Image: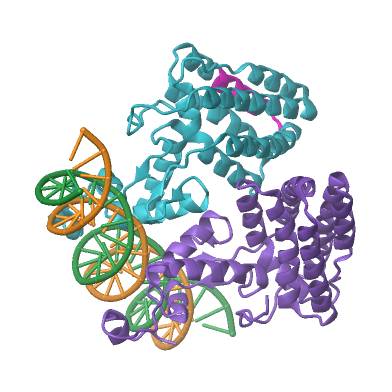
Chain colours: A purple, B cyan, C orange, D green
Amino acid sequence: MRIDKAETAKNGSADAAKPARGHVHEHVLSYMRRGLMVGAFLPGQVMSLRKLAAGFGTSPMPVREVLSRLVAANALEETKGGSVRVPRLGPEKLSDLFAVREMLEGMATELAAKKATPALISQLTAINKQLLVAIDKRDILNCLSYNQKFHFTVYEAADSEVLMPLIESLWLQFGPTMYMSLLIPSMPWNASDHEDILAALKDGNAAAAKKGIVHDIRTTCKALLSVAGSQGIELPFAQGPELQFDY
Amino acid sequence: MRIDKAETAKNGSADAAKPARGHVHEHVLSYMRRGLMVGAFLPGQVMSLRKLAAGFGTSPMPVREVLSRLVAANALEETKGGSVRVPRLGPEKLSDLFAVREMLEGMATELAAKKATPALISQLTAINKQLLVAIDKRDILNCLSYNQKFHFTVYEAADSEVLMPLIESLWLQFGPTMYMSLLIPSMPWNASDHEDILAALKDGNAAAAKKGIVHDIRTTCKALLSVAGSQGIELPFAQGPELQFDY
DNA sequence: GATCTCATATTGTGATCATAAATGAGTTTC
DNA sequence: GAAACTCATTTATGATCACAATATGAGATC
């Protein structure tokens, strides 16, 4: 897809199909955030400003802003040449990342448990049911989506404007690696801890809920490290799949 | 200071005094990061793209990128109109912020204590001595500078690429409020916990070091909340002082 | 005297351009 | 045959422009 100069330059004429009124970068940002968490971009992949812009059908400007923000959130890193790419996470950084996850997400879960409502619990139950379906179908995209939705729904209930952005930053960082690891046959797919978390939330047992999340995170980390250690996680694709999933 | 069209447009001619070779935004970013931590910008202050650019003697472009990144780091917030400003922190957000600080910086200190070298300890001792001088002279800028340098030197020793950016994000968030509070006469200035931390590091006592940092953070939080609660923290300046300090 | 209205100035946003660095392919050389 | 060099393409970057939305301030009205 290419940018047609004649169309973009005189966008003031016709082209009523342009609802984007000065908030193009928001759309690009949310797309890329979701894409990072769900496997649209792979570790090591370099992001070309112009190519991405062409893909979105915009000028490079909004994409520049978005990439800047993602670099600031440590979701992307800049190369020596000024390009940005999806970071490759080594074992040390991966365990660092997950140790901080345990801390932050454990704290958020504890807070959330103290404010949990029946509505929240039924919502989480529904999400988890959809997650189980995705796991059963071995549908990576929806698996990642619903797992993310489950966790973030819990954390959202903590109602902390400070914790949430930090947690999001962490998820953006390990998202691409997580996707890669799910492609490896030996990687275990399970959401068994979610049941315990739900039970703890029903009981209003904050400590147990926290313990459940921490265990979930620790299990994921171990699985990730084992597949990252055995084989070098190097896959044949240069680009992830189309970003289409029903969440 | 204004941008002279004739000079900037044809920068390829003479003007050998332009070391900035495609890394202008880096300079702007580090300046603004430090400025936020040290009181060059005040809570509620709106940042004008063009005015800032004129102040830096550049086009608005590098400033746009920097402001974007600071928004992404939650150091600045965007208004409804698309402008960005320094956030005003309410008591709830302030205590949220400091609760997370305790967690993250406590963890970093624990890690640092396990890797502490004599060189680090003597370095910290020197910084703390300078901090005490700044406190004695009631020099706000250097007080904030050296306090920040003390803390960050500890955290840097933890050697975690994950923790450090998160902690920096937190400091950028409470920096302006911290500066404001130091202007209030009733605000206590002390670094008494730093001695305990140094002692704990010398002993290789990670738990004690962590406890020291947590106590330091908690004390700061209480002081901040008390002055924020009593008076509404509203100061006569529209802009902070010039950014000049010898750190 | 306070409020509303409207003209003006200022703002951010996206597009485009110029430039220099970096990348990569192609060729040459040892 | 492998290493190194050259050149063309692609890259990000900063500056500038056009436009729409917002904020500002003066003037008129109640």
Quarter occupied by residue A17 = bottom left
Q: Is residue A238 left or right of residue B32?
A: right
Is A153 in front, or is B148? A153
Quarter occupied by residue B170 = top right
What is the x, y in percent for residue A220?
Answer: 81, 61
The correct choice, above or below, for A235 with respect to A172 in the image is below
Residue at the spot x=43%, y=76% of the render?
A53
Is B241 in front, or is D18? D18
Q: Is residue A76 left or right of residue B115?
A: left
Q: Is residue A139 left or right of residue B3?
A: right
Is A166 in front, or is B159? A166
Is A211 in front, or is A175? A211
What is the x, y in percent for residue B151?
Answer: 60, 30
Residue at the spot x=49%, y=25% of the render?
B181
Residue at the top extreme, as displayed: B136
Quadrant in the picture for the C terminus of chain B = top left
Q: Is residue B20 visible?
A: no
Q: Which residues are magenta?
A: B116-128
Q: Can residue B197 be found in the magenta stretch?
A: no
Quadrant in the picture for the N terminus of chain B = top left
What is the x, y in percent for residue B232?
Answer: 47, 27
Residue at the spot x=46%, y=15% of the render?
B185
